[in-house]
């Protein structure tokens, strides 16, 4: 009975409050290599955040952390890492890798916070939830492979171009969702098994109009490239969406009449 009650208290403390601060006396904590993290911890919008500067120094005491006020960016440098975190962004950049999370980085009282469930990835660490004390972070090799060594250049090239052509003016999450549709099709037995093959698929007619009007060949904007890399990291709005359409431009589309709606993100409706 005590175990059940204790777990319930921890669950409520972590997930139920809109904004709470957590200190050393709280039943909710963060541990790094089995040592209590004594930096800043907050739970905001059901997400556990940690102060980035102190978290970085707890992971690696030699880490050099600087803040540039002109672009509201915190930069962390270690022997094997360059990590940047920008106020308001939903992603962290580590060695050219893009790690996305639903909740954004933010500043509060001069401290920059990031979701712990995203920040640990930037350091190549692992994380697990422990019922009686909170999050346990374990450092690994201390190295995150570079983006150049992880991302396939051809996949980034075509995925970023279809994202840009279809949703270049959409919010980042909308761009990511378009990229998810492409990759979900790659993983589906009903579509070609490469990004290029999916984009230029004509099995049941032209799938994507940018391959006809030529906008697929237009150089993508920066955020479309970022969205492509986030998708290739494995982040997915939904792993089953296979179609999208702008309902304002095509209110009576075949997709809207024949497929199940997942959600509308920006100006696009996404379907299973």
Image (spheres, rainbow, N blue to C red):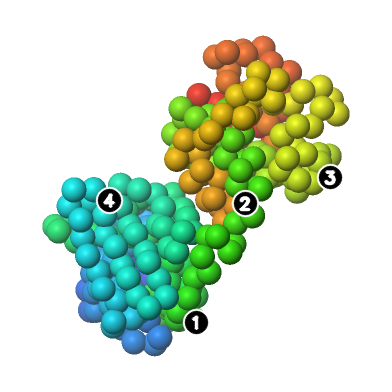
Q: Which of 130 and 149 is in front in this view?
A: 149
Q: Residue 141 carries which label?
A: 1
Nearest to N terminus: mark 2 or mark 4:
4
Q: Name the residue under label 3.
A: 189
Of tags 2 and 4, the one toward the viewer is 2
Nearest to N terminus: mark 3 or mark 2:
2
The residues bearing labels 3 and 2 have C-alpha atoms spaced at a distance of 24 Å
Q: Is residue 131 in view?
A: no
Q: What crowding class fits label 1: few (fewer than 14 Cα within 10 Å), some (14-19), or many (20 or more)?
A: few
Q: Which residue is drawn at 61% across and 43% down?
A: 157
Percent coordinates x, y for residue 196 in the rendering: 73, 40
**Horizontal side, residue 24 vs residue 144: left or right:** left
Report if the CB atoms under discs 3 and 2 are less than 8 Å apart. no
Of tags 1 and 3, the one toward the viewer is 1
Q: Of all residues shown, which one is farthest toward the left?
A: 109
Q: Residue 153 carries which label?
A: 2
The residues bearing labels 3 and 4 have C-alpha atoms spaced at a distance of 40 Å
Nearest to N terminus: mark 1 or mark 4:
4
Is label 2 in a helix, a strand or a loop?
A: helix
The residues bearing labels 1 and 2 have C-alpha atoms spaced at a distance of 26 Å
The residues bearing labels 1 and 4 have C-alpha atoms spaced at a distance of 28 Å
Q: Quadrant of residue 208?
A: top right
Q: Residue 87 carries which label?
A: 4
Q: How many marks?
A: 4
Is label 4 in a helix, a strand or a loop?
A: loop
Q: What crowding class fits label 3: few (fewer than 14 Cα within 10 Å), some (14-19), or many (20 or more)?
A: few
Percent coordinates x, y for residue 12 in the rendering: 37, 63
Is label 1 in a helix, a strand or a loop?
A: loop
Report if the CB atoms under discs 1 and 2 are less than 8 Å apart. no
């Amino acid at each position: 009975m005590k175990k059940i009650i204790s777990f319930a208290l921890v669950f409520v403390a972590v997930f139920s409050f809109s904004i709470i601060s957590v200190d050393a006396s709280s039943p909710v904590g963060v541990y790094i290599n089995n040592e209590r993290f004594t930096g800043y911890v907050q739970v905001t919008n059901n997400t556990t955040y940690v102060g980035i500067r102190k978290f970085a120094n707890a992971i690696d005491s030699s880490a050099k952390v600087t803040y540039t006020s002109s672009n509201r960016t915190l930069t962390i440098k270690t022997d094997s890492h360059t990590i940047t975190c920008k106020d308001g962004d939903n992603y962290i950049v580590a060695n050219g890798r893009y790690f996305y999370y639903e909740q954004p980085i933010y500043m509060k009282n001069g401290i920059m916070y990031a979701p712990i469930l995203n920040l640990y990835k930037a350091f190549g660490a692992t994380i697990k939830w422990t019922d009686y004390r909170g999050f346990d972070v374990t450092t690994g090799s201390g190295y995150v492979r570079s983006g150049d060594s992880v991302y396939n250049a051809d996949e980034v090239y075509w995925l970023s171009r279809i994202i840009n052509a279809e949703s270049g003016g959409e919010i980042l999450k909308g761009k990511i969702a378009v990229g998810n549709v492409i990759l979900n099709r790659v993983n589906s037995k009903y579509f070609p098994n490469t990004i290029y093959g999916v984009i230029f698929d004509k099995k049941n007619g032209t799938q994507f109009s940018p391959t006809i009007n030529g906008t697929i060949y237009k150089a993508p904007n920066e955020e479309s490239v970022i969205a492509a890399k986030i998708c290739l990291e494995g982040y997915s709005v939904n792993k089953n969406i296979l179609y999208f359409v702008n309902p304002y431009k095509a209110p009576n589309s075949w997709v809207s009449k024949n497929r199940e709606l997942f959600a509308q993100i920006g100006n696009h409706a996404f379907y299973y």
